[in-house]
C-alpha cells in the first residue's frame, strides 16, 4: 500500500452587517462588521465534516474586504462632485470569509497508484505535445513574416539593395542574406 497526501480547500463566506452611526448632508458613515453568527455556524459544520473524513486543518486564511466612503457637494457650476472620503476602505477592512485548507493521509493500492501514474504521464505528454505544437505554429508565423520581408532597392545614384535594414552592393547578396536567414530559422531546433 502506498500513502499519499490528499488536500482540500473550502471557502466560507460570512457576509457583513452595515451599522450606520451618523450622517450629515449627503454623507453617511458607520462601521461594517462580519456576521459572526453565520461564520460560527459554517465553521462548526466544516469542522464536523472534516473530522468525520479524517482531515486535518492545515491553514485558515482570512479573506478581507472593505468599503469606501465618499461625500458630494454642489459646486458653483451646479455639477455634483465628490470631494472626499475616509475610513472604511482606507485602513478598516473586515473579514468577509475564510479559506480553510485541510490535508489527510490516504492509503491506496498499487493498482490505484499505477492508474494515477498513468494519468499523470498522459497529462504530461499532452502538455508537452501542446507546447511543441505552439512552438511549431510560432515558427510558421516567423517563417511567413521573414518570407514576406522584401529585398528592396535602396540607392538612387548607386545600386544598393536592402534586406532587414542592411545594405548590400548587389541584389544577389541581399537575396542570399534572406535565404541564409530563412535556412537558419528552419534549422533552429524547436
Image (cartoon, rainbow, N blue to C red):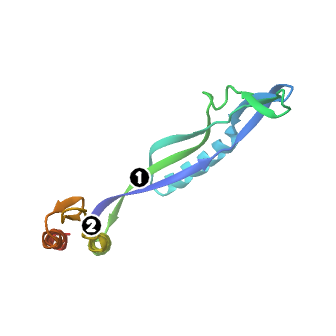
Asked whether 160 or 54 is in front, the reply is 160
Quadrant of residue 120 within the rendered picture: bottom left
Residue at the disc numbered 2: 1
Asked whether 6 or 23 is in front, the reply is 23
Marks 1 and 2: in contact by CB < 8 Å?
no
Give the percent coordinates (x, y) of residue 137: 32, 73
| Residue in view at x 70 percent, y 27 percent | 85
Relative to 82, 11 lies left or right:
left
Circle 2: is it few (<14), some (14-19), or many (20+) Cα within 10 Å? few
Query: Which image quarter holds the C terminus?
Result: bottom left
Asked whether 125 or 107 is in front, the reply is 125
Asked whether 78 or 21 is in front, the reply is 78
Image position of 159 with respect to 129: above or below: above
Quadrant of residue 184 within the rendered picture: bottom left
Give the percent coordinates (x, y) of residue 6: 39, 58
Question: Gap in Å between the C-alphas at discs 2 and 1?
Answer: 19 Å
Query: Which image quarter holds the N terminus?
Result: bottom left
As helix, strand or loop, the secondary structure at mark 1 comes to strand
Quadrant of residue 77 within the rendered picture: top right
Relative to 68, 99 lies left or right:
left
The reply to whether residue 163 is visible in this rendering is: yes
| Residue in view at x 27 percent, y 70 percent | 146
Relative to 99, 39 lies left or right:
right
Residue at the disc numbered 1: 103
Instruction: Return the disc, 2 or 1, that comes first in the chain's sequence.
Output: 2
Give the percent coordinates (x, y) of residue 152: 26, 68
As helix, strand or loop, the secondary structure at mark 2 comes to loop
Give the percent coordinates (x, y) of residue 159: 18, 66
Relative to 170, 23 lies left or right:
right
| Residue in view at x 82 percent, y 34 percent | 79
Amino acid at each position: 500500500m502506498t500513502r499519499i497526501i490528499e488536500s482540500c480547500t473550502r471557502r466560507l463566506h460570512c457576509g457583513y452587517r452595515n451599522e450606520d452611526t451618523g450622517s450629515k448632508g449627503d454623507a453617511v458613515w458607520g462601521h461594517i462588521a462580519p456576521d459572526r453568527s453565520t461564520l460560527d455556524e459554517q465553521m462548526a459544520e466544516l469542522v464536523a465534516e472534516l473530522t468525520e473524513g479524517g482531515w486535518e486543518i492545515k491553514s485558515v486564511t482570512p479573506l478581507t474586504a472593505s468599503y469606501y466612503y465618499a461625500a458630494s457637494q454642489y459646486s458653483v457650476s451646479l455639477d455634483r462632485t465628490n470631494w472626499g472620503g475616509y475610513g472604511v476602505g482606507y485602513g478598516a477592512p473586515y473579514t468577509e470569509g475564510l479559506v480553510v485548507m485541510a490535508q489527510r493521509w490516504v492509503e491506496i493500492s498499487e493498482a490505484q497508484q499505477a492508474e494515477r501514474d498513468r494519468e499523470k504521464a498522459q497529462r504530461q505528454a499532452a502538455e508537452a505535445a501542446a507546447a511543441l505544437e505552439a512552438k511549431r505554429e510560432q515558427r510558421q508565423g516567423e517563417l511567413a513574416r521573414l518570407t514576406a520581408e522584401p529585398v528592396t532597392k535602396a540607392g538612387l545614384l548607386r545600386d544598393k539593395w536592402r534586406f532587414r535594414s542592411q545594405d548590400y552592393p548587389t541584389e544577389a547578396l541581399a537575396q542570399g542574406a534572406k535565404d541564409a536567414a530563412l535556412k537558419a530559422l528552419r534549422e533552429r531546433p524547436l
